[in-house]
Image: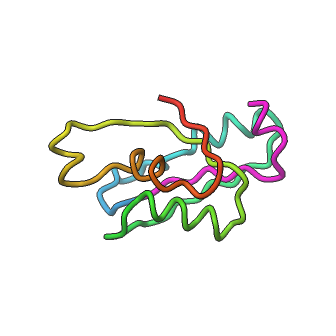
Amino acid sequence: MPFLTRGKTIDVVTIGTGKDRAGEIQGADVAQHLARHDLNVELRRINAGDVDVANVILSDAADRDANLIVMGGYGHSRLREFILGSATRGILSSMTIPTLMSG
């Protein structure tokens, strides 16, 4: 929270792949929690389509001139990561701005 209170705007970004649950607004609970701390929060959803999720996150951060990415790290089985890749691994291997990751 100390990092976030210094930001002018906090973007809560969710990445969709077209397989999301209907009627569910991903990230709304996080955005609401941050707003309760008097932070200027914007909830945005980006559809990744067939693009690598890590690249979508890094590209969006660059487009928005972000100073910090805060994200949770999540692992899958080795087979699934081999086939689908891993956003966590992708961010860690090619981050272009400071990243705070929580597992």
Residue furthest to the front in view is 93
Seen at 47% across and 51% down, the residue is 91
Residue 63 image point, x, y percent: 65, 71
On screen, 17 above or below 73? below
Give the mark count: 0
Seen at 33% across and 36% down, the residue is 75
Image quadrant of residue 95? bottom right
Residue furthest to the left in view is 79
Describe residue 55's horizontal placement relative to residue 40 as left or right: left
Q: Nearest the camera: 30 or 84? A: 84
Describe residue 89's horizontal placement relative to residue 94 as left or right: left
Q: Nearest the camera: 76 or 40? A: 76
Identify the magenta region: 1-15
Image quadrant of residue 50? bottom left
On screen, 27 above or below 33? below
Q: Is residue 3 magenta?
A: yes
Q: Quadrant of the N terminus?
A: top right
Seen at 55% across and 36% down, the residue is 101
Q: How is the image coloured?
A: rainbow
Residue 53 image point, x, y percent: 41, 59
Q: Is residue 60 magenta?
A: no
Residue 66 image point, x, y percent: 70, 58
On screen, 93 above or below 62? above
Q: Nearest the camera: 77 or 8? A: 77
Seen at 29% across and 57% down, the residue is 19
